[in-house]
Image (cartoon, grey):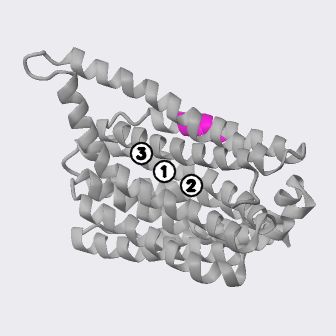
Amino acid sequence: LAEIDPNLNLVIIAIVTSLALNLLLTSIVISSLKTKVLPIVNIISSASKITLSIFLILSGSGVLGISLSYLVFGNALSAILLGIFSIRLFRSTSKDTPRSEIDLRHASRDLLAGGVASWIPMLITNVGIQLGTIVLFGSKGSEDTAVYFIPLTIVNALLVGTVSLAAIGLPILSSIRDGRKRFAWQTIRWGYFISVPLASSIFFYSWDILNLLGQNYVEGKTSLQILLLSLAPTIILSGVSNLVYAYGNYKKSLAIDITMGFARTFLYFILVPIYGSLGASVAFTAGSLAALIVSIIVTRKIGMIIFWKDLVLLFFIPMLIGFILQS
């Protein structure tokens, strides 16, 4: 670490701090079930982050400039927006309820208690996502890290849409008593319908997309394609995790996220030193597949039906169309 720019060290510390704060505030919003703000915040921060990152890459600002874009227009911007909403949430809760029954202290305690139940899985998930970049940087250096970082950013942008869709459906899942499993299945189906066609387009035109960012990033084509394969299982496990969370069965939800985070972490340290960015991509996708297996076990225990034929069609039809157009 002694060879790293001291300014970059400070930026990395700020990114980690803002990420932890962002996760906690997101959990508070989820626990309030007023999650309509989440996709808005995610879209604003992600669009700003990606736009600025591309501009900085093209202008040759280097790792420090890209890190600042992640900090200012990524985690920090998201944390500020969620913080403003959380403050308004606490005030409205204490104002709408008679003071004899609840005050701001009780409202804060209840929201924080519910938020911790979702904060821990989210923290584990994000550590599993970002750890590959850190291990890659430590074992292979900045060049391979940059090749992996850009595909990971693209895939994370797609995952934001999936997570946002699940977050929108969480209040409905928590409020209804009948048809929860059917509604959870619909969120999974719509997640495939929205995300898979876009992912398949990027899959078959990954070279062209990365070439727009610079010739050096074309080497990340295979990494991007492998990472894109994680999208399909992630949609399923997100839907199942939200369902059991709505039931109040936090242990099953936590089991899904722990499996994904542990599998990725374990494989990062084994595959990255040997295969570099490809190893990180394989570890990332393998973690999603491991969590999918746990999700399938959970669905059988709670009696949820997943129509696999529909998902197979929703996956392979866009892939087939993309393959034909590429040929």
Quadrant holding the C terminus: bottom right
Q: Residue at x 77, y 61 (%)?
A: 146
Quadrant holding the N terminus: bottom right
Q: Quadrant of residue 107?
A: top left
Q: Nearer the viewer, residue 296 or 62?
A: 62
Label 2 and label 1: CA atoms lie apart by: 6 Å
What amino acid is labelled 1 in the image?
Val
Q: Looking at the image, is 289 positioned above or below residue 18?
A: below
What amino acid is labelled 3 in the image?
Ala
Left or right? Give the position of 95 relative to 57: left
Q: Is residue 201 visible?
A: no
Label 3 and label 2: CA atoms lie apart by: 12 Å
According to the image, label 3 marks what residue?
167
Query: Mark 3 and 1 residues: CB-CB less than 8 Å, in contact?
Result: yes
Left or right? Give the position of 67 relative to 242: right
Q: Looking at the image, is 309 positioned above or below residue 270?
A: above
Give the magenta part as a residue range.
41-46
Q: Quadrant of residue 43?
A: top right
Q: Residue furthest front?
A: 2
Q: Which mark is residue 159?
A: 2
According to the image, label 1 marks what residue?
163
